[in-house]
Amino acid sequence: MNAPLDRAYLDHAATTPLRAEARAAWIEASEIVGNASSIHGAGQDARRLLEDARDRLAAALGCEPIEVVFTSGGTESINLALVGLLRTRRAATGRNLMVVPEGEHHATLDTVRWLESSGQADARWVSIDADARVDLDVWRAALADERAAVATLLGANNEVGSLQPVAEASAAAADAEVPLHVDAVGTFGHVPLSFRELRADARGGTGLVALSVSAHKVGGPVGVGALVVSRHVTLEALLHGGGQQRGLRAGTQDVAGAVAFSVAAELAVAALAAEAERVGALRDTLEEGLRAAIPDVVVSAAGVDRLPGHLHVVLPGAQGDSLLLLLDSAGVAVSTGSACQAGVPEPSHVLLAMGVASDLAAGALRFTLGRTSTRADVDALLAALPPAYDRARRAGLSSRTPRA
C-alpha cells in the first residue's frame, strides 16, 4: 500500500498513485542492460522481459499478445488508432468520414479536428444525451453513411463518468462494416473489459479493431500506454524507423515501463470487483452527503451506470475554478473536468453537448476516488465544500466581457 497522501486526493481520474509493486518491478527491470531488438544475450534478456510483460498485459485486456502495441500513453494510442485507421481506410476504399460522438476526450476531438483541418477527413459528430451517452439509433444511422471510414467511442465519459453501451456500439459497427476504436483509458481496471468479448463475432477489419489504455490510470508509471490492434486489421504507422511491434510503432521499446504497466494492470484487474464495490460505496456516501449539505447541487448522469469512483456535480452560481482553488487551499484536491484541459476558462464541451447551459456548466466539479481513497477523504471534502461554495457563490461567475 502506498504511503498516505498529505491531502485528501479526489482526482484519481487525472492520475492515480504509482503502485509499490509496479515501482519495484520498474526499478528491477531497469537494471537489465540490453536493447530488446538486439540479438546478443543481453538484448534477449531484455526481450524476454518485454514479451512476458506483453503476455501479462494481453491476459488482463482479453486479447492476444501480438495485438498489444506499447506506446507512450493514451494520447499516442488514440492518435495512432485514429490517424492510422483513417489513412488506411481512405487508401483502400476512398472513404474519409469519421464517426465521432460530441463528448469525447480532447485526445480524440483534437486529432479528428486536425484531420479535418488538414483535409484528410470529414467528421460526422454524433449527439450525446443528457447523461453523455450516445443513442444507439443515432449511432447506427451515422455508421450507415456510405462514406463512413472509421468510428470512435469512449468507454466511459471522462468528465461525468457515464458508461457507454460499448458492446452494442461495437456490434453496430461490425454490422455496418466500419472499424471501431474504443478509448478505454478511463475504464480499464475499473470496470470489466475484454477486447475479445467486445469484438464478439466481428470478422476481418471491421467492428472493434483498436482499444487504447494507459498505465498511470491503474497505478502504473506515467509515460506508458498501449494500443490493442486486432491482428485482422492493418493501419498506417505514425512513427517509422525500426519496424518494431508489427511495424506499427518504431523505436527502442521501454522494457521497464512495459513491465511496470503489466504488473499494475494485473493487480487492478484481480482486485476489480472488490475495489469497485468499496470505491462505489465511498462515492455513494459522498453523493448522499453533498445532496444533504448543498440542496442546490446537481449530480451529473445520476440515473445511469457510472464508473464506480466517479462523481461529477454542478454547483449553480459558482465558478468551478474558484471552487477548485478554495478546496485546494483547504487540503482537498479535485478537478473541474479533464486534466488535459486544466486552466482553460471555457465551459466543458461535454456539458454543453449534454444540454447544460453555459452559466451552469461553469460551476462543474469532478470528484474521482481510487485505490488509496478512504472515508477520511470523503469527510474532508464534505467539510470543505459547503463553505467554499458559499464563498464562491458570493463572488459570482467570472465575465469574459472586457470592461470599457
Image (cartoon, helix red, strand yellow):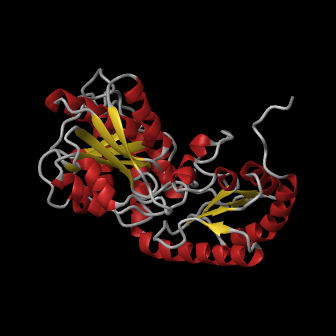
Quadrant for residue 269, please give it: bottom left
Residue 343: image location, x then y, percent:
68, 40
Picture layout, residue 117 above or below residue 245: above
How many numbered discs sit on the rendered protein? 0
Position of residue 398 in the picture relative to residue 87 (left or right): right
Position of residue 54 in the picture relative to residue 144 (left or right): right
Residue 112: image location, x then y, percent:
40, 35
Residue 140: image location, x then y, percent:
26, 55
Q: Quick one: quadrant of the N terminus?
A: bottom right
Residue at coordinates 41% horizontally, 66% vertically from top-left?
Answer: 191
Residue at coordinates 27% horizontally, 41% vertically from top-left?
Answer: 150
Q: Quick one: quadrant of the C terminus?
A: top right
Q: Is residue 53 visible?
A: yes
Front residue of 350 and 38 = 350
Q: Is residue 30 visible?
A: no
Toward the front, the furthest residue is: 404
Residue 64: image location, x then y, percent:
21, 52
Front residue of 210 and 136 = 136
Residue at coordinates 39% horizontally, 58% vertically from top-left?
Answer: 134
Toward the left, the furthest residue is: 203
Quadrant for residue 282, please give it: bottom right
Position of residue 315 in the picture relative to residue 93 (left or right): right
Picture layout, residue 128 above or below residue 76: below
Front residue of 114 and 245 = 114
Quadrant for residue 373, please give it: bottom right
Picture layout, residue 132 above or below residue 222: below
